[in-house]
Amino acid sequence: MVAGLISVETDDSLKVIKEIFENARFHHLLVVNAEKLVGVISDRDLHKALNPNIGTVTETLRDKAVLNKKAHQIMTREPTTLPMDADLRAPLLILFEQIRA
């Protein structure tokens, strides 16, 4: 069902994550640790962490240093998941429960 899955490790740098997003056609990356899903990073999470001066002539050493941060520092932890055989209504029920909370 999942071919060519791309994920990052918790200690991968934001530089690696930035390169993946620049070369891929998706907006979320799974973060794994010992092959277990531990988080998710969206392209928006990355953009919030980075300074817009990166890659420009006004880039500073401090701006560049942010690229050394690790995935676990910006990821959303403990994402909600469903088993492969979950009913198609299951995600709707979860969303409804979160809205009511």
Image (cartoon, helix red, strand yellow):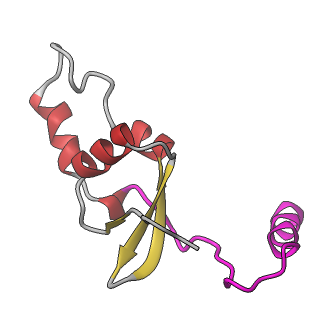
- State the residue at coordinates (18%, 14%): 58
**Above or below — where is 99 with respect to 59?**
below
Can residue 2 be seen at all in this image of the molecule? yes
Above or below for 80 versus 61: below
Give left or right: position of 5 versus 91.
left
Which residue sits at x=33%, y=36%?
50
Above or below, 58 against 73 in this view is: above
Residue at the far left: name it. 61
Q: Is residue 81 above or below residue 56?
A: below
Q: Quadrant of the N terminus?
A: bottom right
Q: Position of residue 68 (x, y in %)?
A: 18, 50
Q: Which residues are magenta?
A: 74-101
User: Can you see residue 49?
Assistant: no
Residue at screen point 39% across, 62% down? 6
Q: Position of residue 87 (x, y in %)?
A: 84, 80
Apparent side of residue 95 relative to residue 66 in the rendered image (left or right): right
Q: Position of residue 9 (x, y in %)?
A: 30, 69
* Depth check, front residue: 75 or 92: 92
Q: Specify whether 72 is left or right of 85.
A: left
From the viewer's side, name the closer residue of 81 and 48. 81
The answer to which quarter of the image holds residue 84 is bottom right
